[in-house]
Image: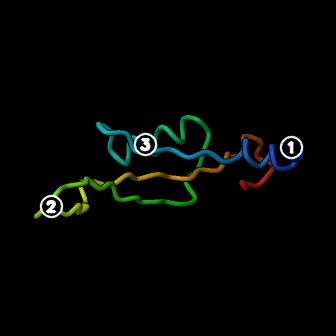
Amino acid sequence: MGKSGEERKIEQMKKQFEVLENETIADCLARMEKEGFQPVRRIEKPVFREVKKNGKKEYEPVTRKIIFEGRKTSSDPNIPDL
């Protein structure tokens, strides 16, 4: 079953922005603002590497992904931000 018009509208108002490899958090936030989004949530996900120690598979943390969830800001001053 497809999504309703309301669900599609909400999806267009939300977007996730990942901090890229050679980008600072401030650069990512500036990119969000340029696209008309305001950060509402920060998500950090660990990235692991599989290594073999003594014949067993183990997972070591290597780095982390930082993702910001943004909501579309209103360009109309009469409509409050969402």
Question: Which tag is nearer the camera, tag 3 or tag 1?
Answer: 1
Q: Residue at horizontal 16%, vertical 57%?
A: 52
In 3D space, how far apart are the residues under numbered discs 2 and 3 (Cα atoms)? 41 Å
The answer to whether residue 77 is left or right of residue 64 is right
Question: Which tag is nearer the camera, tag 2 or tag 3?
Answer: 2
Residue kind at label 3, given as amino acid type: Cys
Q: Please state the horizontal and vertical placement of residue 64, each as a whole percent of the image.
A: 32, 55
Vertical arrangement, residue 23 with respect to residue 78, above or below: above
Residue kind at label 2, given as amino acid type: Gly
Res 55 label = 2
Q: Earlier in the sequence, mark 2 or mark 1?
A: 1
Which of the image's four quarters has the C terminus? bottom right
- Per the image, the residue denoted by label 3 is 28
- Secondary element at tag 1: loop
Q: Nearer the viewer, residue 33 or 48?
A: 48
Q: Earlier in the sequence, mark 2 or mark 3?
A: 3
- Secondary element at tag 3: helix
Q: Residue at horizontal 25%, vertical 61%?
A: 59
